[in-house]
Image (tube, rainbow, N blue to C red):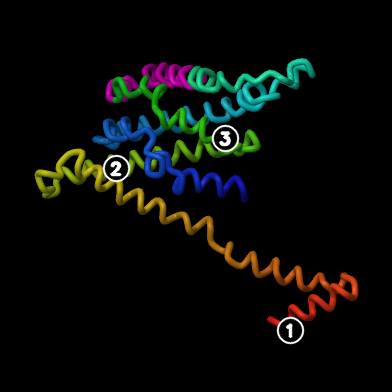
């Protein structure tokens, strides 16, 4: 259940584009055609799915204070957290280079369509944001880190795919001259963000009944108390 909740939350509620405005440069520049948006979105999913769990391993066994204790007690005092940015970016750049080589080899047309934005995934703040959010939210297991990376990538993919489909159709609409181009794109992005945030109730419903259950359990457990405590509890019940 925890994996499913984190998966849907990273796609809809904590969407990289709509909730934190990360990766907006590529989102706006490569969303004019659905075909290029699909290619870049798939590349972002792959990079996030690989780099977030890899950076989780680096954070847990190398970067956190005391993470080197597995080498011996004499290394437990070392704190390499100041290397987090360098290690995370090195991992991301390596994976992006791998994606670039694969895309250029098997899909030259997509490689030419993406242009400079494919190697720029290495400096896409959405990619680095995935690893930094994983670290700051203290995701406890490698499995959850993988789910978070895949979900964040799918969320970014859905965002750029949706805006690309809308921008292709909106060319044939009668948009006021002052709103053409980025103006109408920002308005549509804002409306899509509101729509994605409405999924928040899907994961937070049903929490209001919890305090009532705790109060009932406290009063019922009074039968195990001493005589003086029973008198106090009975007085409280009479006052209610």
Residues under numbered marks 2 and 3 in contact, where contact means CB atoms less than 8 Å apart: no
In magenta segment, residue 35: no
Residues 92 and 217: in front is 217
Figure check: 117 above or below 20: above
Disc 1 residue crowd, few under 14, some 14–19, many 20+, Cα 10 Å: few
| Element type where label 2 sits in the image | helix
Depicted 69 relative to depicted 134: above or below: above
User: Viewer-proximal residue, 169 or 120?
Assistant: 120
Magenta run includes residue 103: yes
Which residue is label 2 attached to?
A: 163
**Which of the two discs, 2 and 1, sits closer to the camera?**
1
Image quadrant assignment for residue 66: top right
Specify whether 137 is left or right of 183: right
Q: Earlier in the sequence, mark 2 or mark 3?
A: 3
Crowd band around label 2 with a 10 angstrom C-alpha radius: few (<14), some (14–19), many (20+) = many
Instruction: Specify few, some or many for label 3: CA neighbours under 10 Å numbering under 14, 14-19, or 20 or more.
Output: many
Distance (Cα) linking label 2 and label 1: 61 Å
Q: Which mark is residue 146?
A: 3
Q: Earlier in the sequence, mark 2 or mark 1?
A: 2
Distance Cα–Cα, label 3 vs label 1 = 54 Å
Question: What residue is disc 1 on?
Answer: 238
| Viewer-proximal residue among 18 and 1 | 18
* Quadrant the C terminus occupies: bottom right
Q: Quadrant of residue 65?
A: top right
Residue at 57% x, 32% y is: 135
Give the prevailing secondary structure in the magenta stretch: helix
Q: Read off the magenta span.
A: 91-113
Counting from the top left corner in percent of width and height, residue 202 is at 50, 58
Considering the numbered disc 3 on the image, is that residue within a helix, a strand or a loop?
A: helix
Q: Residue at x 49, y 43 (%)?
A: 10
């Amino acid at each position: 259940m925890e994996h499913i909740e984190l998966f849907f939350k990273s796609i809809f509620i904590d969407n990289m584009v709509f909730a934190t405005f990360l990766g907006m440069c590529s989102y706006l520049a490569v969303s004019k055609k659905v075909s290029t948006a699909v290619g870049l979105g798939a590349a972002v999913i792959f990079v996030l799915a690989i780099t977030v769990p890899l950076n989780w391993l680096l954070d847990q066994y190398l970067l956190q204070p005391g993470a080197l204790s597995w080498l011996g007690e004499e290394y437990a005092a070392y704190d390499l957290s100041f290397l987090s940015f360098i290690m995370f970016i090195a991992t991301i750049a390596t994976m992006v280079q791998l994606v670039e080589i694969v895309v250029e080899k098997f899909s030259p047309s997509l490689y030419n369509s993406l242009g400079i934005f494919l190697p720029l995934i290495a400096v896409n703040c959405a990619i680095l944001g995935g690893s930094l959010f994983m670290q700051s939210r203290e995701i406890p297991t490698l499995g959850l880190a993988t789910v978070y990376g895949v979900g964040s990538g799918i969320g970014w993919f859905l965002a750029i795919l949706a805006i690309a489909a809308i921008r292709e159709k909106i060319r044939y609409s009668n948009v006021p001259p002052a709103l053409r181009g980025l103006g109408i794109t920002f308005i549509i992005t804002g409306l899509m963000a509101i729509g994605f945030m409405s999924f928040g109730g899907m994961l937070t419903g049903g929490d209001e009944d919890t305090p009532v259950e705790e109060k009932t359990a406290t009063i019922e457990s009074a039968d195990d108390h001493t005589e003086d405590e029973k008198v106090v509890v009975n007085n409280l019940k009479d006052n209610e």
